[in-house]
Image (cartoon, rainbow, N blue to C red):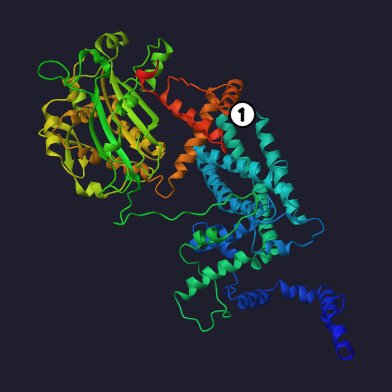
Amino acid sequence: RRAIEDEDDFFDSEDGDGFSSIRSSLEAFLSLQESYLGFLISNVCARMRAYLRGSAPFIQVDPLVFLSPGTGTNAPSQNFLLYAILHLVCMKEKDDGDDIDCIKNDAIILNKGNRNMGSVSLLSCAIFIARSLQKTSELVVEGLIEDGMTGKVSNGQLYSKLMEDYQCLWDVFIAPAGGSLSTLTFSEDVQESLDSVRRLLVTSVDEVLAKNEPSDMSAVSIARALTSVELTSSVHGLREALFREYTLNIYPVFKRHIFHEWACQEAKQNRFGTRVSIDKYLMPSSYNGMTKGSMKRFLRQVELPNGVSLHRPSPKIFTSGGDHKSHQASSVALVFGTDVPTDSGSVANLSESDGNKSVRRFAAVSLQAGEPLQHSLVPNSIPPVFESYAVVPPFHERPFLGTLRDEKNHRITVDGWEVSLTNFTFASGSSGLDDNEWLYCVSLVLRKPRVSVQSKRSRKYLSEQDIGLECVHKLVCDETFSESKSDRNEFKSPLIETESDGCKSRKMLVSSEPSEFNRKLQEQSWSQSVDSSSDVIVGLAIVSDRNETFRMRETLSTVYSDFCRRNLCQPLVDVLGNFSNSCVEESCLRSILEPYLSFTAAKWVDRPIHDQEHQFSEISGTQLIQSIPPVPLALLFVTVLLEQKVVLASSRRGMLMAASDAIVQLLKPLEWKHLLVPLVPESMMN
């Protein structure tokens, strides 16, 4: 009627067009209609929204599909559960005056606002009870019956596991002050169940502790109390109440959430990859799992709210040949040591005045398979002064506890070798290493003091026969072993023991058998050919143009522990010293290190290289704080801010590298633009 009477007034009124009042009236009317509100949260509306958006078919997934206790190892249900948990992680805090937080929780852009810190505990507590606590309780009941029949306490570890689970339940979830469930507002049903578990748990444990029984009997008594019918039923009731709370109040919200649509889209791709559908949008279907890689795709596209760390899995990087060789990229292995005397009794190319500085490089090989890449680290890139940094000074005499500690922690072996594993950095001295200013190194140095110092320490020695059984006499080619992979958590040693004509010997399996290396190894052991009137040194080092200190350090530790059984160092000394012969194959060094590199690289192969750098920086900061008292540490920080000179001294070379790195990290976002020398060789100390 208004439009017919005055068209201009209808469309150009102060309150907007004439439809504004109609829309307002309809909104006010529908907001009070229970049937309309019920339609908005129904499956029919969710299916319509999915159809209109063209995002995915709506799939009705019963909560029991991913909440039942038996679905812990079921991949399809586990994937859907992860979507549901991440929905809880992204739940936002309610603003004042908001009765229902549907709009915020249904937003596609989720990185605005603070999340509800305890929301995820509603579901995670129930899952923890169902999949861990109750299963442990069932095993403990069987263990108590068994111990009651035998009269022995043979299931102590099982009882400890139950107490650990209950401790976790209390500390993480149900503690009145500090538990994550204490931050949420529940229905009366859930609150009663929660209060009941708290009361029974405290009462049961207090009654047992009041008896002051011996530790073994106390563990049995606590296990009986924690598996009592009353407490077990109360915990089960809490689990069911939490599941009901989620199913009735949270799950309908999740079905309207964009995360649910993404889950349905992944399920649709999985479903239509196996069968043909007539109507890909409205055909009812059951949930049968998601396509492979669904979680990685999900984490890459979601924007998480404040309070949740952003994590996006990085793709794996493979070489063009298809073999994963990340542990060999831009790394060089070196062997160095004291030179063997010549026929005239002097040391080759060195004067007598050099003393224990008579150390030269025996071998250097690239650990990168195939042809080196552009700007990659090669043996010729290592400066000639490297050995002066890598060699560790002799141990100082430490009487009483110091000496005992050296023997206990194997810093000095039973055959008199001092063992040092240290990490350091030094300037690369080249601009061709992909703009890397520093080279990172870990060196394993074995030093045998001269006879006078050795006799003063009065070390005990094994017989020559025992030492001979531990030494490696030959490198044997075994292609099957080189193709096999060590488990990530268990190292498969390439060293084997063989017996021929009643004689036992120790051999090493390698990818290619070096004839000259074996010939020299069997002629005479290097440890017996060097001059013992002065300190004898031999070392193995790995150098990288990236901070891979953790991987390199673990590699050399594994090499030492594998070769030097029974705290006997000569097997490794003879193998490394054999590289002093110019005729042996330097490539043999790569074959020797290959299984150890593969084992240690397995722990980092799925992670970006900068993870090691970040972890090293964190540990370096901790070491610096633990080494320097608060006041000197504050003065050090101020001194560096004022761009003054700072000299660090330590008996531990690794500490110098950690301290210099930590100080630089403390300055961020500022940068140290002046001279930085993390380590100077012994000749420059004064």
Q: Residue at x 66, y 30 (%)?
A: 211
**In the rendered view, would you say 669 is above or below 305?**
above
The quadrant of the rendering that contains the N terminus is: bottom right
Quadrant of the rendered image containing residue 60: bottom right
Residue 382 seen: yes
**In the rendered view, would you say 485 is above or below 651?**
below
Q: Residue at x 68, y 49 (%)?
A: 117
Left or right of residue 104, residue 5 in this image: right
Task: Provide residue 589's location: percent of width, then percent of height.
Answer: 23, 37
- Dot 1 falls on a residue whose secondary structure is loop
**In the rendered view, would you say 180 is above or below 543?**
below
Task: Provide residue 616's location: percent of width, then percent of height.
Answer: 47, 36
Residue closest to the eye, 58 or 439 = 439
For label 1, the residue is 213
Quadrant of the rendered image containing residue 380: top left
Residue closest to the eye, 504 or 482 = 482
Q: Residue at x 39, y 43 (%)?
A: 489
Residue closest to the eye, 478 or 374 = 374
Residue closest to the eye, 266 or 110 = 110
**In the rendered view, would you say 464 is above or below 199?**
above
The quadrant of the rendering that contains the C terminus is: top left
Left or right of residue 107, residue 272 in this image: left
Task: Provide residue 404's location: percent of width, then percent of height.
Answer: 39, 15
Query: The disc labelled 1 sits on which kind of residue?
Result: Glu
Q: Residue at x 36, y 19 (%)?
A: 682
Residue 153 seen: no
Count of numbered circles on the image: 1
Left or right of residue 429, residue 61 in this image: right
